[in-house]
Amino acid sequence: GAMSFNSSVKNADNDRELIEECVAGSDKAWDELYSKHKQLVYKICHWDRWHFNFDDAEDLVQEVFISLKDSLKRFNYESSLDTFISNLAKKRCISRLRHLTAQKRGSGAIHASIDQIDPDTDQPVIVVADPNPGPAAVLEEKETKEELIHALEELGESCKEIIIMKYYGNL
């Protein structure tokens, strides 16, 4: 209704004002931005699918807000501030995941799959393979493979061949 439209316009205006004050270096504005968005960032960084320990997740929350100081200058108002901060947090988490996985393997190779859909964006989330999967993970991987095979079956023959060659052959 008109009510929610007005409140979202008001929020956008408030955000614009807040962003401008943050970029200008107002500590008060930063405090407000932090308290307004810390739940969102906390939720993303502490998402159990990342498998971060508590301290790593807390570090990431801090890193997101630190990197926000720079990236806010480039905020172009094409998305909501929530979406912008949420994407920044997800990128930060994925980058940490890649780093941890590369460390675990002692090499740059990362085995990742797109088997989760982010509940906020409906976009696939890259989930990195656990080198020591438990029985539940083994079962889940088996189910995922079956779903993948099923999905491949439903594709047209040429599409299927391209995907199989790209991911399983040497295309």
Image (spheres, rainbow, N blue to C red):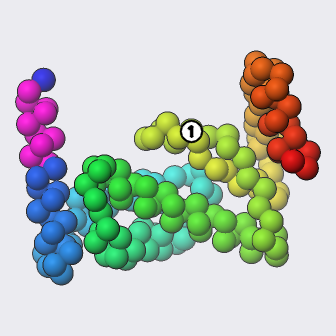
Q: Residue at x 31, y 75 (%)?
A: 69
Is 31 displayed left or right of 146 in the figure?
left
Dot 1 amino acid type:
Ile
* Above or below, 15 relative to 114: below
Q: Is residue 24 magenta?
A: no
User: What secondary structure prevails in the magenta region?
Assistant: helix
Front-lying residue, 120 or 157: 157
Q: How many other residues sit within 10 Å of disc 1, few (<14), some (14-19) or many (≥20)?
A: few
Residue 107 visible in the snapshot:
yes
Front-lying residue, 123 or 76: 76
* Above or below, 45 relative to 70: above
Q: Which residues are magenta?
A: 2-11
Residue 135 visible in the snapshot:
no
- Badge 1 marks a residue whose secondary structure is strand
Front-lying residue, 28 or 151: 151
* Quadrant location of the N terminus in the rendered image: top left
Q: Residue at x 51, y 61 (%)?
A: 91
Q: Which quadrant of the figure has residue 144?
A: top right
Q: Which quadrant of the figure has residue 72?
A: bottom left
Query: How far from the left and from the top, in percent, is residue 82?
Result: 31, 52
Front-lying residue, 10 or 48: 10
Query: How far from the left and from the top, in percent, is residue 39?
Result: 33, 56
Q: Residue at x 15, y 59 (%)?
A: 16
Q: Residue at x 48, y 69 (%)?
A: 60
Q: What is the number of callouts on the image?
A: 1
Query: How far from the left and from the top, in percent, is residue 7?
Result: 10, 39
Q: Which quadrant of the figure has residue 51?
A: bottom right
Task: Find disc 1 in the rendering and name its residue.
Answer: 117
